[in-house]
Image (cartoon, grey):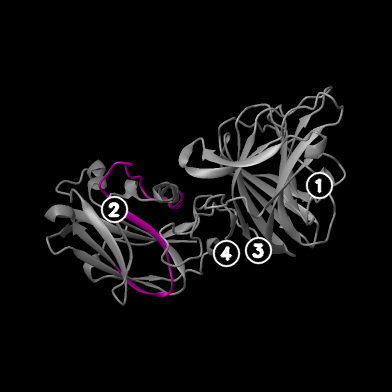
Amino acid sequence: MKKTNIAAAVLALLIVPASQAAWTLVNDFEGANPIANVGFATSPLPADGGNGSISVVADPTNAANKAIRLDSGTIITTSTSSNNAWFWVDLPTTTAKATVYSRFLKTGQLVDIVWGTSPTAAPASYGDFSSALRVEIDGIFDYRNGSVGYPEIIGSTSSINTWYDSWFVVDVATNTYDVWIKGGIYTGATKVVTGADFRNQSTGAQNRFYARSTAGDLTTPKQVNPVLFDNIWVDASGENISIPSKGSGTSGDLSGGSVPAANGTGKLSNLSTNTEIGASGLTAGFVVTAERRVLVRAVGPGLGGFGVTGFMADPSLEIKNAAGTSMGTNDNWGSASNAADMKATMAAVGAFPLENTSKDASIMVLLPAGVYTAQVNGVSGSTGRAIIEVYTLD
């Protein structure tokens, strides 16, 4: 482990810019009218008894977040027709290879839900899907493979009240797609579909996110429980198996861009340790040569677990650019709005974990090229040993 007097250190961050910044938010279902641009339809039509619906509801796992709820409705007892409901959201036009990300959650086990991409302006049937992932009442994931049907993903199963991340990597030129899932039994992003054929074999641009549910009919009842979807994003530059977060690609945004989906996506640029910080604080300089997402930590109490004594009890951290403008501040990392993203990133890059309630400080932020300082001070005049870590994130 490299040790240096970081008070005089200049850290050069020389890695190619992060692909995470290519994410474009399509709809996170927040705001004043979160479904203003969402298409919705039922079959049969409402006049003929179709009773499905969409609505925006609180996330059952996080009341501060909103998601769209798709309810297929109830079986029409006067008809033998299946009762269906679906919605679609316009995507940036994709004519080559791109990644479409979304999350979904089952509110109960009795669901029959299909979602994926489509080139159709107002998709109306299962045949309008290009890429398609499905979960039925058996809880098993399957996917559409051209005209073959829906092969099951062996060993897969889905749980209720659990958010699943899904990535559709679509290749319009070859009419094929891959799928990755994270959630439940998939503790990390896991590739579950490779090179499946588009259902409709269309060479048209993939420009719709499409989700469809069915309550079934009198002889074959299906969906009873609504399904939630949230956070639809697109990376039109190619494959991107990371979890996007609000502010991706926006310099200075404390979301810090996307959370890595696998280990090995970060690099420790420098580390200062065994540094006594007095009342005047400590300033470390670093250089970003191209737009980079960085994770900077000021750790005091976290050193106690390594047998370090005399550590700074409560460090605070601030990043400033060359003009002295603050790019982010933090005191007590667990209270940050993007603490969950930082925790996932710390694990992904191999940084030692911090207690959620610790008084250590941490900032994850997307920075444009430039010269920066990381300033550490003790809250209420506290002094002692602390370290500064700067991670660059691919």
Q: Amino acid at mark 2?
A: Ala
Q: Earlier in the sequence, mark 4 or mark 3?
A: 4
Q: Amino acid at mark 3?
A: Ala
Residue 145: where, in percent of width, then height?
81, 45
Residues at marks 1 and 3, CA–CA distance in whole angstroms: 25 Å
Image: 50 above or below 354: above
* Residue 124, numbered circle: 1
The kind of secondary structure element at disc 3 is loop
Disc 1, disc 3: CB below 8 Å?
no
Mark 2, residue position:
361
In the foreground, 122 or 239: 122
Residue 230 magenta-drawn?
A: no
Q: Nearer the viewer, mark 1 or mark 2?
A: 1
* Classed neighbour count for the residue bearing mark 2: other residues with Cα under 10 Å, few (<14), some (14–19), many (≥20): many
In the drawing, does residue 324 fall left or right of residue 27? left
Residue 69: where, in percent of width, then height?
62, 39
Mark 3, residue position:
236
